[in-house]
Image (cartoon, rainbow, N blue to C red):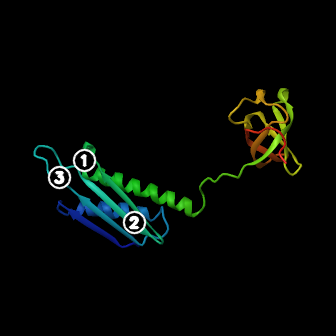
Amino acid sequence: MMLMPLQITWRNIEPSAALEARIRELAQRLEKFSAPIVRCHVIVEAPHKHGHQGNVYEVHILVTTPGDTTVANREHRERHSHEDVYVALRDAFRAVRRQLEDHEREHRQDVKHHEPETSGWISELYPAEDFGRIQTRDGRSLYFHRNSVVGTDFDRLTTGTGVHFVEESGDSGPQASTVKLITHPGPAS
């Protein structure tokens, strides 16, 4: 059972009970992917009549959720697969579903966000064991692995080299990841 108001607009195409049923089915599925949908407006259009070729259909979908409107347009005048209105409809609903899923992830703050980088300098290196230590500006010593070094080769590092890094929790406590060289090496005060 569909909870949202659904509006279907037909442009240059005769309304079809079968097509309307398919639109209702696809619209109802959208409710699984989003916060409450306030309104869904689907526009099915056959903009150009070609003499010997079929029509290339356009489908526009506007979905309104609390605080946001999502729009999907499927206009493929050169795409022959959209000579089938059901294919154009499917593609438009897929596009709006992806947008709703992205919006929901952002709303849940489920998107990747990057930790801020801090800086320090390399205080110890153990190339045979594939790790080193970074002295932080606040006097702590953090472990980093060879694989954490970005933008240069671990074997080219030297003690005293200034680095930016991201601090994260490791098996044995805090450690540095995403270790990058900075332009002015050495401890800065």
The structure residue drawn at horizontal position 34% and vertical position 53%, both measured from the top left corner, is: 90
Query: In the rendering, which numbered label is found on residue 38?
Result: none
Q: Is residue 66 left or right of residue 136?
A: left
Q: Which residue is mark 1?
A: 77
Determine which quarter of the picture holds residue 40: bottom left
| Sequence-earlier tag: 2 or 1 | 2
Quadrant of the snapshot with the N terminus? bottom left
> Which residue is at a point 45% across and 57% down the rendered structure image?
99
Picture quadrant where residue 7 is located: bottom left
The residue to which callout 3 is attached is: 48
Q: Which residue is mark 2?
A: 63
Q: Residues within 10 Å of mark 2 (few under 14, many from 20)?
A: many
Image location (x, y in percent) of residue 130: 81, 31
Kindly identify the amino acid type of the residue bearing the numbered disc 1: Arg
Cα separation, mark 2 vs mark 1, equals: 23 Å
Give yes or no for contact between labels 1 and 3 (Cβ–Cβ under 8 Å).
yes
Residue density around tag 1, few if under 14, some if 14–19, many if 20 or more, within 10 Å: some
* Circle 2 or circle 1, nearest the eye: 1
